[in-house]
Amino acid sequence: MPLVLFGHSMGSVVAFEVARRLSDVESAPPHALVVSNITAPHRLHRRDPLPVTDDGVWEHSYSIGGIPKPIYRSRVLKNMMAPTLRADYEMLNRYRCDPSPQNSCPVTVLHSDGDVLTTLDDASAWNELTVGTYSYEGFTGGHFYLTEQEALVARLVSELGIGHTAEELRTAVPLQRETSSADRTHTIEPVH
């Protein structure tokens, strides 16, 4: 069964590093790497550092849509969750990528037009980190766009796992999602 690694935001960096290590093992290279809404790892050090205090992490996570308002307002949940988020932010601030050992597996980048953390240019720079094929899929929404388009993202990742490229999927069967406000479908067009 082919292995497709998927990561969103910081999870993309984890998936990338796993893919690099598996690419070094001839018997187990990943079939594909799918990353979502994060600057290419070799450019992460160029952006402003993420906050590292509990209050700063909590505010930042809320501002990008990562924490729903009822949870955000709870001091108890903040005290439970903020230290874990802070550790994630600190790790991402310290991470440095050596761009020289490139991935051999295909890389598909998912990026939303409203992501305030990642520019199109920084998302597209993932193509510099693979000697395999590269594709880009544009979405509508903020940093956590995939919560509203979960079925579409899951289908794309699944189809990549059975050997289709993102380009083949786009030309053969348009990617569609149901809107929550009406019974109509929208084709998600890639941004080039």
Image: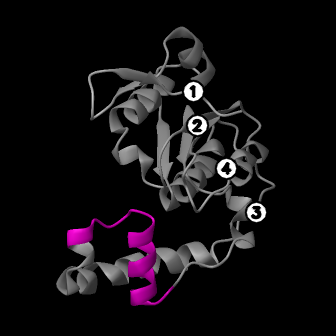
Q: CA distance from mark 4 to mark 3?
A: 17 Å
Sequence-wise first label, 3 or 2: 3
Residue 138, position in %: x, y?
Answer: 58, 37
Q: Secondary structure at mark 4?
A: helix
Q: Which residue is mark 2?
A: 138
Residue 62 visible to the viewer? yes
Span of residues in magenta: 52-70
Q: Amino acid at mark 2?
A: Gly
Q: Secondary structure at mark 3?
A: loop
Residue drawn at (79%, 46%), measured in percent from left and top?
Answer: 128
Q: How many marks?
A: 4
Sequence-wise first label, 1 or 2: 2
State the mark number for residue 123: 4
Q: Is residue 50 left or right of 7 when viewed as pictured?
A: right
Question: Mark 1–mark 2 contact, CB under 8 Å?
Answer: yes
Residue 7, position in %: x, y?
Answer: 48, 50
